Amino acid sequence: MKKKIQKNTGVTLATFFAALIYFFPVFIAVINSFKTKGEILSSAISFPKAFSLENYKVVIETADFIHVFFNSCLVTGGSILLNLLVSSLAGYALARWNSRWSKFITLLFLSSMFVPFHTIMITLLTTAKLLNLVGHIYGLIFIYCGLQCSIPIFLIQGFVKALPIELEEAAKIDGCGMIKLFGIIAIPLIKPILATISILNALWTWNDYLLPYLILGKPITIPLSQMYFYGQYNQQWHLIMAGFVVSTIPIIIFFLIMQKHIVNGISAGAVKG
């Protein structure tokens, strides 16, 4: 019993120190967001002489934060909703389709997870231009939906396989059609995995810089707007840090609200399936 307590204490201490190491860059960014540029160049790890919100005011006004915040919410929310619709339909169909073709299609989806984005970047951009998706927010939403489908389909398929099929059979006997069966029976049961997918995709989409840069080419999302403070010969580090803090707060709040679903959703979908 004593050895077990010592082991648990050791694991707790190791986890605590690991958390401190990961949190330290965030701490540095937060304290530097209240400094002037001169204070940062003098010492990046010291506390500011005065905690002023002037940097945040400049960031919000200069980078048109309200507008880019709305655009980021639109891109993130739109891509997540569209992805949940497509992935849930595909995952449910593959889970209930007893055929060797379903296994082949699942393997095809999983294989796309191992393809680096940079290998398809030029082809993706060329295809997006042909479909008139470049330069439009809706084009970015469609592309995010497609790129984010492989893992959600795999998780939803595993989650659905763990559900008792007797519920669906009873609903069919009562005259429930496939669409109604999916909406009334399946969707409420797979809510945990849908919440998990929403969190994972939101973290990726909100913080992504490369894809919006390729598709939009304009600073109309939060990651792109932060480049306003990077110059060829002058980097405004005090404003960069303030922009980082402002852009991170919404996604942290969303994560804290939804975090309880991550472990439950992934374990239920990947382990039970």
Image (spheres, rainbow, N blue to C red):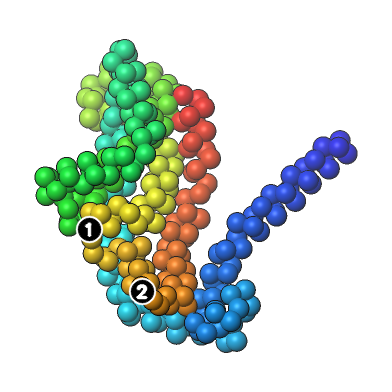
Identify residue for label 1.
216
Please give the name of the residue rendered at 11% of the width and 45% of the height, measured from the top-left corner. 130
Q: Quadrant for residue 213, please give it.
A: bottom left
* Residue found at the very far front of the displayed protein: 233
Q: Amino acid under label 2?
A: Gly
Q: Position of residue 133 (x, y in %)?
A: 16, 50
Nearer to us: label 2 or label 1: 2
What amino acid is found at the position of numbered circle 1 in the picture? Leu
Quarter of the image with the N terminus in it:
top right
- Residue in front for this viewpoint, 235 or 211: 235
Left or right, residue 50 beside residue 71: right
> In the visual, does 52 lie left or right of 160?
right
Picture layout, residue 172 above or below residue 74: above
Q: CA distance from mark 2 to mark 1?
A: 20 Å
Which x, y percent locates residue 192? Answer: 44, 39
Which is nearer the eye, 120 or 53? 120
Instruction: Please tell me whether mark 1 sits on a helix, a strand or a loop.
Output: loop
Return the residue found at the far right. 2
Quickly name the residue at label 2. Answer: 231
- Is residue 91 in view from this perspective? no
